[in-house]
Amino acid sequence: MRTIVITGASSGIGKATAEVFLDAGWKVGLIARRADRLEAMANWHDNAVALPADVTDADAMQAAVATFVKQAGRLDVLFNNAGMFGPAGPIDEIPLDGFEQVLNVNIRGMFIAAQLAFGQMRRQDPQGGRIINNGSLSAHNPRPGSVCYTTSKHAITGLTRSLSLDGRPFDIACGQIDIGNARSELVEELNARALEANPGADLQPMMEVEEAARSVLHMAEMPPEANVQFMTVMATKMPYIGRG
């Protein structure tokens, strides 16, 4: 049975991805802070393992990954998904602690998860695995007022490229999925902010979150000799190409 750990698994893209992988017959480790949601998913499916942890807590993450590997035997894939948007606006209106919180979750948290997964994949027999980082359209073309989020997601593109190179001697592949306007809690929050600023605002087109989840499954199921390095999946009519 193939195995995957998903961070940010209690809601949105993470939860939808966990459900898609469970339906496909994978053993799925669920990492997030909200233990009650993870337990509910684990009670629903025998192949789901609830691993409550904060991705920024290195000790808790180490324990979570160790628990999963002890049960599953190995780690084939990490979907490095947990993240937050943070404060929005021009840079001179952003509180420094808000910026630091975004970096802590979106960069440090993803670094910790990747470090643990890479180490496990390097040590296990047979060696190897795959790390899929959740980037964003903002990793390439930012939306206005997203300086915190955009800065963090550009860093994740660098993480993806570095892991791709460093993983080659150990048969560890790394790819990045850049998702635009999936119907998740994060996007709903952005829509709420837009309506608060302008009740007559036109909300951006969205796609169902399951479309993003199926794209992650496609990346995970590639044979070891192939890798989706970067994938963009988004609502068809959203402003992305040429937005500014």
Image (cartoon, helix red, strand yellow):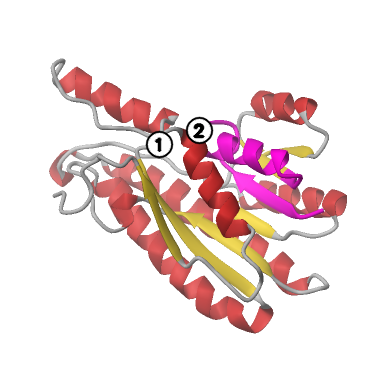
Of the pair 21 and 157, the residue shown nearer to us? 21
Secondary structure of the residue carrying numbered label 1: loop
Residue occupying image coordinates x 62% and y 29%? 34
Disc 2 marks a residue whose amino acid type is: Gly
Left or right of 148, for residue 171 = right
Asked whether the viewer can see residue 80, the reply is no
**Nearer to us: label 2 or label 1:** 1
- Disc on res. 12: 2
Q: Are marks 2 and 1 in contact (CB under 8 Å)?
A: yes
Residue reaching furthest to the top: 199
Which disc number belongs to residue 134? none
SS for tag 2? Answer: helix
Residue type indicated by callout 1: Ala
Q: Is residue 162 above or below residue 191?
A: below
Stretch in magenta: 1-28
Residue labelled with disc 1:
182
Q: Is residue 237 visible?
A: yes
